[in-house]
Image (spheres, rainbow, N blue to C red):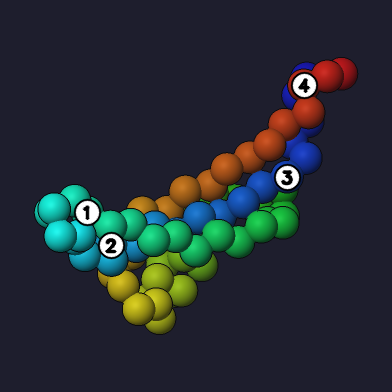
Amino acid sequence: MAEIIDSRLTLEFDAGTDESGEKILTYKRFNNVKTDAEDTSLQSIANVLGPLQEFPMVGIKRTNEYDISK
C-alpha cells in the first residue's frame, strides 16, 4: 500500500488579466501540511485565509506525495 509522505495546500487567486486578455493567476502554497489533516479542515482554513489576501481566491488544491516503492 502506498504511504503518504508529504502534503501541500495551494490557494489560487485571480490577479486580473494581462495586456492580451489572458487571466493572471497567483498562488500561495503551504508546504508540510499534516498528512492526516482532513480535506474539510484544510478547506475551512483556506476559506478563512482567502479573504485576507490581495486578490480574490478562485481555487483550493491539496497535493499529496506518496511513496510507492514499498
Residue at position x 78%, y 28% from top?
A: 67
Mark 1 / mark 4, whichever is N-terminal: 1
Q: Earlier in the sequence, mark 3 or mark 4?
A: 3
Quadrant of the rendered image containing residue 70: top right
Query: In the rendered view, would you say 3 is above or below 24?
Result: above
In the rendered image, the vertical position of residue 53 relative to residue 34, given as above or below: below
Circles 2 and 1: CB atoms closer than 8 Å: yes
Marks 3/4: CA distance?
13 Å
Q: Residues within 10 Å of mark 1 (few under 14, many from 20)?
A: few
Q: Position of residue 51 (x, y in %)?
A: 35, 77
Residue 6 coordinates in the image, percent (x, y)? 73, 45
Mark before the other along the chain sequence, 2 or 4? 2
Q: Residue type at mark 2?
A: Asp
| Residue that badge 4 annotates | 68
**Quadrant for the N terminus in the image:** top right
| Mark pair 2, 1: CA separation | 7 Å
Left or right: where 61 falls relative to 69: left
For marks 3 and 2 on the same chain, the one whose residue lies earlier in the sequence: 3
Q: Which residue is mark 2?
A: 14
**Circles 3 and 2: CB distance less than 8 Å?**
no
